[in-house]
Image (cartoon, helix red, strand yellow):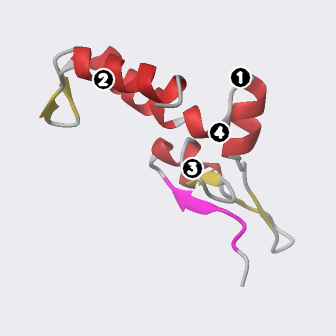
Amino acid sequence: MKAFGVLSMDSDFYIYSNPGYIPLDSLAFEDDGSVRCVRYRPQDLAAQLQIASTWLPLFAVSGCLARSPNACCGRSIDRGALIRNVVAVSCGQ
């Protein structure tokens, strides 16, 4: 069975490799019995940003750092180590 998308209220699915993220609040049940929704596909987001889809997880980290520069998802972040790792990945190390 092939999935159409991930139905969730967790916007992290914008960046994960999946068939598409469907925000739960985008579901609309029509009178004729059909269901409408909005589906966001990570590969489309990457194409729009003109980056490889493998770079999308960096947006999750940067978004978390923007909300709280010293803590991300309940963990302390060493920003220097994060930058070194991003440079290493971008340089193919």
Of the numbered discs in the image, which one, if any, rests on residue 25? Answer: 3
Q: Three-letter amino acid code at disc 2?
A: Leu
Which residue in the rendered view is the most extreme toward the front? 93
| Picture coordinates of residue 5, whole percent (x, y) | 66, 62
User: Which segment is the magenta one?
Assistant: 3-8
Q: Three-letter amino acid code at disc 4?
A: Ser
Q: Earlier in the sequence, mark 4 or mark 3?
A: 3
23 horizontally vs 44: left or right: left
Mark 1 vs mark 2, CA separation in Å = 21 Å
| Picture coordinates of residue 15, whole percent (x, y) | 55, 42
Asked whether residue 68 is in view, the answer is: no
Q: Looking at the image, which is closer to me, 84 or 65?
A: 84
30 horizontally vs 84: left or right: right
Q: Nearer the viewer, mark 1 or mark 2?
A: 2
Q: Earlier in the sequence, mark 2 or mark 3?
A: 3
Q: Mark 1 = which residue?
A: 49
Q: Mark 2 = which residue?
A: 82
